[in-house]
Amino acid sequence: MNWDDTAQPADDSTGRLVGSAADGEDQAVEAALRPKSLAEFVGQERVREQLDLVLKAARQRGATADHVLLSGAPGLGKTTLSMIIAAEMEAPIRITSGPAIQHAGDLAAILSSLQEGEVLFLDEIHRMSRPAEEMLYMAMEDFRVDVIVGKGPGATAIPLELPPFTLVGATTRAGLLPPPLRDRFGFTAHMEFYEPAELERVIHRSADLLDVHIDTDGAAEIAGRSRGTPRIANRLLRRVRDYAQVKADGRITQEIAAAALGVYEVDARGLDRLDRAVLEALLKLFGGGPVGLSTLSVAVGEERETVEEVAEPFLVREGLLARTPRGRVATPAAWAHLGLTAPQSFGASGSGQGDLFGA
């Protein structure tokens, strides 16, 4: 197995406990906690069923599996599934990333060294350079690449045959993939956020592997604050484990989990300090909005990109904040979550603008 550096999502630099990007500690722990087969993989039932059919059919034909594209938010299991694909096909896997391939020659070097049936996992595939992307078209479809030798009028294209391989591409932004590349994948799957019950199963499995005793209510408490993401669930479990070890007898109950996550400022809906700061500024300073992103960022004391790319996606998904042409607007759920009462001018629709004629 070959591990290359992979690009980190925008929220990685913030060091947030509920950030969906993986840091060094996460990567080390995830390697130990990752399921090794589709049967062990928790959640994503439809994707698992479809992928199981694809892999079984390929094994029965004695052929390599079709190219696979996995899309979805960070932390949902795309890398894990790529490793499972290799394990199910009994093939080696090579891992690299789109940002690491800046030139067509970089990709040619990787492709020319693949073994027959090998799985090539290309993370953040949408960030690959355009020349490499165009080379990948032919490699995926015809298992061939043209290596350019020389420059200018004397340049010569030398065709290089490749052994059959399976490309597994992963992306957090499928819309950025050009149609010619997207169409060359034989199987495309979108990873959904997990339900709390599924995250509880993930937490119980991880607790067993980490030799941590956790009861049903404790797992439910952590799952409810994990933003539908297994990576975050496992990270919170480790922090709760530390608290239980130092402050209690090492056993995780609902009370211990709630107390631990209170110390780490992760509330019952999974909001952390930054999320609540954005909501509090929007509600207390601007009456629920609408307010421009730049103004809101100044009020929070964060960069515009941090608020827009790190805090807002989850707040919008939770129905606590809305993006409108006039600016950011809080929803009634935001007022309720912070225990505040919306001003009368907020309006029944939660628009912050009152009714049409000022009623």
Image (cartoon, rainbow, N blue to C red):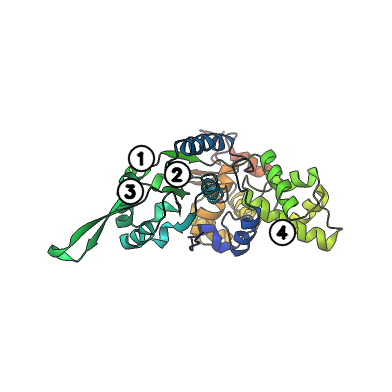
Disc nearest the viewer among 2 and 3: 3
Instruction: Bin the neighbour count of mark 2 within 10 Å (Cα to Cα): few under 14, some 14-19, many 20 and up.
Output: many
C-beta proximity under 8 Å, tags 2 and 4: no
Report, in whole angstroms, how far the alpha carbon at label 1 lies from the one at label 4: 44 Å
Q: Which residue is mark 3?
A: 143
Q: Position of residue 22 (x, y in %)?
A: 58, 58
Q: Amino acid at mark 2?
A: Leu
Disc 3 secondary structure class: loop
Q: Which residue is mark 2?
A: 69
Report, in whole angstroms, how far the alpha carbon at label 3 lies from the one at label 1: 16 Å
Closer to the camera in the image, 179 or 261: 179
Q: Which residue is mark 4?
A: 264
Q: Earlier in the sequence, mark 2 or mark 4?
A: 2
In the rendered view, tell whether residue 11 sits above or below residue 287: below
Report, in whole angstroms, how far the alpha carbon at label 3 lies from the one at label 4: 50 Å
Q: Position of residue 349 (x, y in %)?
A: 57, 34
Q: Earlier in the sequence, mark 2 or mark 3?
A: 2
